[in-house]
Image (cartoon, rainbow, N blue to C red):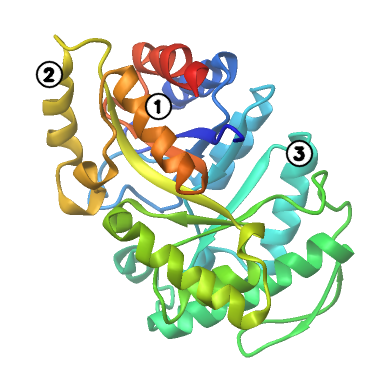
Amino acid sequence: MTKPEIGVFLPQMGFTYAEILHRARRCDDLGIDSLWLYDHLYGPGAPDYPSMEAWTLATALLSQTKRIQVGHMVLCNQFRHPAVLAKMATTLDQISGGRLQLGIGSGSLEDEHTRVGMDWGTFAERSERLGETLEILRQAFAEERIDFAGKHFTVRDMPIKPGPVQTPRPPIIVGGVGEKYTLPLVARYADVWNVPTYALGELEHKTAVLRSLCKDIGRDPDTIVLSIEAVMALAPDDESLPQVRALAEKRFGIPAFGLHEGGLVGTPPAIVDRLHQLQELGFGQIVLFTHDRGSDQTLELLASKVIARL
């Protein structure tokens, strides 16, 4: 069985650039596969905290690391015109030597749209826009040109050169579990499907729905990498576990983070066992919030005592 890709989700709220860069370089040096940022104009629920812009930050981190992949969980489709995003993505894939992962969603925070006078729309409308963006991105990556007329976007004979380094394209990750709008887009367009923390209790059901949708359109569901986003509270030993668990509960205890459903609370052997379970369920990518926001100790423990044993 192939080892799953292990990534670290590092929401950038409250960090200085130096602090984020230090964590990115530690992940790079330790052999952690990927690093993930969020895409919001400010930290969700905390508009007065410092929070760096997602694409600029990813570009900086990719330019200052050597092997790690960098992506977003997930880009807000509302923020960038899809033709501009395609140009940005191919450029960053070139700059990084093929280390971009392109996570994208329909948007999740109405307040940041309201503050800047940006149209929010219904979930159905946002999903329509996302579908058109996904079509445009796939066309841009495959043909180095966009010629598309849709309900929301029209792009005429637009060259996108140079194309991406990665073949056939940078992985397109679509996150979410909505059965009416999101999962049909996953089935049609995604290379990777990410299950967010709030849906960890529904893994088997949502996976079955996706497989059924793939069957309806004639796509082999095994061509979609299954990805999971979960909180990990990793303790070096049994003695420190209560303190680690308490910090995880304080920071990630609300239901939306799925701390208990994820099952990733414990010492390295317990975490390895749970990751093996997720691997057996078919998950090829596991993106981890760490309980202490990526401390050196936890990153080193993750690399040496968890990833090394998968």
The image's mark for residue 49 is none
Callout in the foreground (3, 1):
3
Residue sitting at x 61%, y 85%: 152
Q: Nearer the N terminus, badge 3 or badge 1?
A: 1
Badge 2: residue crowd in 10 Å (few <14, some 14–19, many ≥20): few
Q: CA distance from mark 1 to mark 2?
A: 26 Å
Secondary structure under the numbered disc 2 in the rendered image = helix
Residue 14 shows in this picture: yes
Amino acid at dot 3? Gly
Badge 1: residue crowd in 10 Å (few <14, some 14–19, many ≥20): few
The residue where tag 1 is placed is: 16
The residue where tag 3 is placed is: 98
Residue 107 shows in this picture: no
Q: Nearer the viewer, residue 255 or 10?
A: 255
Horizontal side of residue 42 vs 125, given as left or right: left
Q: CA distance from mark 2 to mark 3?
A: 40 Å
The image's mark for residue 243 is 2
Q: Position of residue 92 (x, y in %)?
A: 72, 43
Q: Position of residue 197 (x, y in %)?
A: 32, 51
